[in-house]
Image (spheres, rainbow, N blue to C red):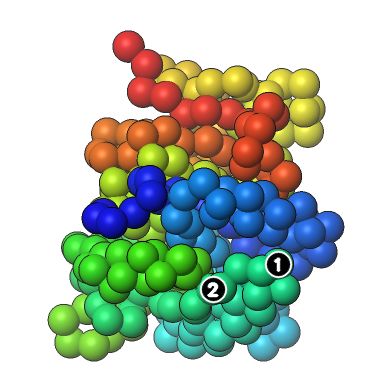
Amino acid sequence: MTDQKSSPAVVKVSGSLLDEPDALADLWPEVRALHGEAPVVLVHGGGAQMTALANRLGHTPERVQGRRVTGDLDLEIAQWTMGGALNTKLVSQAQQHDLRAIGLSGADAELIQVSKRPPWTINGHTVDFGWVGDIEAIHSDMLEVLLTQSLVPVVAPLGIDDDGQIYNVNADTVACALAEALAAETLFFVTGAGAVRRDADDPSSRLDTCDTATAQRGVADGWIEGGMRVKVETALSALAGAVGDVHICGPDDLLSRSQATEVVVGT
């Protein structure tokens, strides 16, 4: 990044929050205040909305260890929801909160260049994720230009390969890759839980910090699983790259981080 007042922040918002008006009402003042201090890139999920639309179409989505399997119909649903309705909704709401936002997907200007994920072997079974992309490169020059204009890019987690095929890409992974490419000072994973908890139903079990050893124990013991497992593992990957710090927080906690979990590498 050049010609910036400071290193950017990347904010990834869970799709589960996008249908909660109270959560979004809490989020936007935080993003606006954060944008007053540093450039901001917002990445959004949309798994909940994809599942809802799939159910309306009589289709049952498949997930493996928190990651979505994307067939032909699933890919169309991803484009309709994340690349369309959700992205424009967030751009509209940003404008309502005095933020100049621009909606993008990872296919625009080859922002997120991917290749088709090869089959994985999980618990002795071969899993074909379908039209799921693994990130090969981030072409961040377009984002950097937008950030110099004080715009807030709102990025839908779709990618494109060398042949122009569109892919669904895990939004947490997209946020991590963009944060690394931009050498972001801070990466936020904004969730409904607002933190890592030893007991998902008990807010008092929140962790102030989660290091590598704690994450490994949590996965082994089963209290870090599904989407939270992906977030924690992605956060550790970001810290191994060029990202300064990573927080898992609620929509009203980007600035104070008083109820957040900071993910740290540990010793």
**Image location (x, y in percent) of residue 239:** 33, 34
Q: Secondary structure at mark 1?
A: loop
32 or 122, which is in the foreground?
32
Answer left or right for 199 relative to 42.
Answer: right
The residue indicated by pointer 1 is 97
201 or 173, which is in the foreground?
173
Q: Amino acid at mark 1?
A: His
Q: Residues within 10 Å of mark 2 (few under 14, many from 20)?
A: many
Q: Amino acid at mark 2?
A: Ala
Q: Secondary structure at mark 2?
A: strand
Residue 222 in sight in this render = no
**Image location (x, y in percent) of residue 193:** 70, 41
Point out which mark residue 240 bears: none
Answer left or right for 116 relative to 202.
Answer: left
The residue indicated by pointer 2 is 101
- Compute the Cα span from label 2 to label 1: 10 Å
**Image location (x, y in percent) of residue 99:** 61, 68
**Image location (x, y in percent) of residue 43:** 49, 62
Q: Is residue 252 above or below residue 130?
A: above
- Place residue 39 in its image quadrant: bottom left
Residue under the point 34% across and 54% down: 4
Residue 108 in sight in this render = yes
**Quarter holding the C terminus?**
top left
Answer left or right for 211 relative to 178.
Answer: right
37 or 177, which is in the foreground?
37
**Quarter holding the N terminus?**
bottom left
